[in-house]
Image (cartoon, coloured by chain):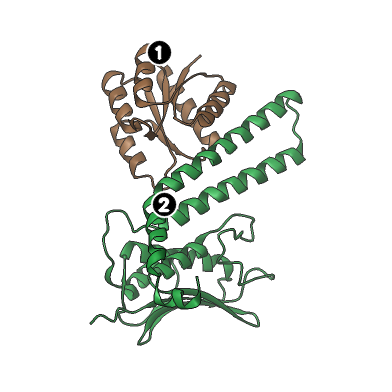
C-alpha cells in the first residue's frame, strides 16, 4: 500500500483528506508544519506528500525544496487555497508533481495519485 | 453610506475600514477556502459512507442532493476568489496609468472572435491587465446572454467616457436584467457564472459602470469607463 503524507495545519482538512485517500486504498500520515513534515519525510520516506503551501512555520515550497534535494523519488503534490496559481506554478518548476486548489477537485486528485503510482511502478 | 459619500468618495473615518479590508483580503480569501474545502471533503466522505452502507447501490435523489451541494460550495469558492482577487491591484503593479482602452477593447473582441466596431483612441486611468480582463469577461458573459444572430458589439467615445455596448436578443425567454450582475447568477445551463458581476466590479474600481437596458425583445449591456481628464 502506498504511503501518502498530508501536511496541512488545518486539522479538519487533513483529517478529511486522510479519510478520502484511505478510502482510495492509500495509507495516510498527517503532519501540520514544515518542521514536522520534514521529520515525517525522513522517518517514513512516503511515496507521495500532499503539502499545503501556507504552513504556520513557513511555506510548503520550503518543504518541497528539501524533499526534492534529498528524496527526489518522493512525489509532491501542492495544495493551495489561493485563487491565483503563481506559487503553484513556481512549485511545478521546483519539481512538484502537480497542484490542486481548494476546494479540492477529488476526482482530479485521485487521477494525480494514480499517475504518480503508475510512474513509480515503472 | 449615503449617496453623497458615494459620489464624493469615502469619508476619512471609512478609509480605515477600506484599508483593513484591502490589506487583509488575500488572507481572508485563503481562510474562507479552508472551511469550504472541509465541507467538500466531508460531502465526498458522506457519499462514500452511504454507498458502503447501501451495498454500492446508487440513489438518484441522494446523488442529486450531493451534486447540488457541491455545486453551491464551488460557486462560493468562485465568488470568494473573484471578489478578493479583484479587490486588490494586479500583482506587482502600482498606481493606474492612462491606457488606450479602445485598442484593448479591439484586441479583446478579436480574441473572442466577435465582429466589432471601435472609434479612435480613448485614454482611461486604469491597469491594463484588469481592463483587458473586464472586456474579456463582458464579451464572454454577453455572448452567453444574447443570441449570436443580430448581436452587435460596439466601442465608442464621448467627451467624458468610453462605452462598450453589446446589444441583441436575449437567449433566455425569462431574461431578467437585475440578476445578471449578481455573483450568484446561474446561466441557462445551470452553471454559476460570475463574468458580468466581475466586470461590474472592475468597471466600478476605475470609476465606471456596467448597466443593462431592455426594450421589447432587445437587450443592451453597456460598460462605460471615464476618460482620463488630467491633460
Residue toward you, A4 or A120: A4
Circles 1 and 2: CB atoms closer than 8 Å = no
Q: Quadrant of the C terminus of chain A?
A: top left
Please tell me if label 1 and label 2 are on a single chain. no
Residue A75's place in the image compared with B193, above or below, is above
Residue toward you, A17 or A73: A17
> How many residues crowd around disc 2 within 10 Å: few (fewer than 14), some, or many (20 or more)?
some
Residue ID at (27%, 19%): A70
Can residue B110 be seen here? no
Q: Secondary structure at mark 2?
A: helix
Residue ID at (38%, 32%): A55
Q: Secondary structure at mark 1?
A: helix
Q: Which chain is green?
A: B
**Residue B228, picture quadrant:** bottom left
Identity of the residue furthest to the bottom in this view: B159
Residue B229's place in the image compared with B72, above or below, is below
Q: How many marks are shown on the rendered structure?
A: 2
Identity of the residue furthest to the top in this view: A43
Residue B93's place in the image compared with B96, above or below, is above
Disc 1: which residue: A44
Residue toward you, B116 or B126: B126
- Relative placement, left or right, of B214 versus B142 is right
Badge 1 sits on which subunit?
A
Q: Nearer the viewer, mark 1 or mark 2?
A: 2
Residue ID at (76%, 35%): B59
Q: Which chain is brown?
A: A
**Residue B46, picture quadrant:** top right
Give the percent coordinates (x, y) of residue A59: 33, 33
Identity of the residue furthest to the left in this view: B231
Identify the mark at residue B25; answer none if there is no mark: 2
Amino acid at each position: 500500500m502506498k504511503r501518502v503524507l498530508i501536511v496541512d495545519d488545518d486539522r479538519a482538512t487533513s483529517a478529511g483528506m486522510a479519510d478520502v485517500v484511505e478510502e482510495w486504498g492509500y495509507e495516510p500520515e498527517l503532519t501540520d508544519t514544515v518542521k514536522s513534515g520534514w521529520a515525517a519525510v525522513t522517518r517514513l520516506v512516503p511515496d507521495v506528500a500532499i503539502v499545503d503551501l501556507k504552513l504556520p512555520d513557513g511555506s510548503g515550497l520550503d518543504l518541497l525544496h528539501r524533499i526534492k534535494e534529498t528524496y527526489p523519488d518522493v512525489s509532491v503534490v501542492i495544495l493551495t487555497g489561493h485563487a491565483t496559481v503563481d506559487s503553484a506554478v513556481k512549485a511545478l518548476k521546483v519539481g512538484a508533481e502537480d497542484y490542486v486548489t481548494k476546494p479540492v477537485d477529488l476526482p482530479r486528485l485521485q487521477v494525480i495519485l494514480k499517475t504518480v503510482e503508475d510512474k513509480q511502478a515503472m | 453610506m449615503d449617496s453623497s459619500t458615494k459620489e464624493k468618495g469615502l469619508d476619512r473615518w471609512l478609509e480605515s475600514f477600506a484599508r483593513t479590508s484591502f490589506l487583509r483580503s488575500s488572507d481572508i480569501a485563503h481562510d474562507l477556502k479552508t472551511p469550504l474545502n472541509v465541507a467538500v471533503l466531508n460531502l465526498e466522505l458522506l457519499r462514500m459512507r452511504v454507498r458502503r452502507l447501501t451495498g454500492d447501490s446508487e440513489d438518484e435523489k441522494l446523488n442529486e442532493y450531493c451534486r447540488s451541494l457541491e455545486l453551491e460550495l464551488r460557486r462560493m469558492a468562485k465568488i470568494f476568489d473573484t471578489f478578493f482577487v479583484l479587490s486588490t491591484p494586479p500583482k506587482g503593479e502600482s498606481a493606474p496609468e492612462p491606457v488606450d482602452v479602445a485598442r484593448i477593447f479591439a484586441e479583446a473582441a478579436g480574441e473572442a472572435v466577435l465582429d466589432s466596431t471601435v472609434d479612435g483612441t480613448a485614454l482611461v486611468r486604469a491597469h491594463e491587465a484588469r481592463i483587458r480582463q473586464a472586456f474579456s469577461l463582458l464579451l464572454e458573459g454577453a455572448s452567453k446572454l444574447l443570441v449570436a444572430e443580430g448581436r452587435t458589439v460596439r466601442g465608442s467615445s464621448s467627451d467624458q467616457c468610453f462605452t462598450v455596448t453589446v446589444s441583441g436578443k436575449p437567449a433566455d425567454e425569462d431574461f431578467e436584467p437585475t440578476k445578471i450582475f449578481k455573483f450568484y447568477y446561474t446561466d441557462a445551463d445551470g452553471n454559476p457564472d460570475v463574468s458580468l458581476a466581475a466586470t461590474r466590479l472592475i468597471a466600478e474600481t476605475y470609476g465606471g459602470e456596467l448597466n443593462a437596458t431592455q426594450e421589447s425583445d432587445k437587450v443592451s449591456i453597456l460598460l462605460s469607463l471615464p476618460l482620463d481628464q488630467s491633460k
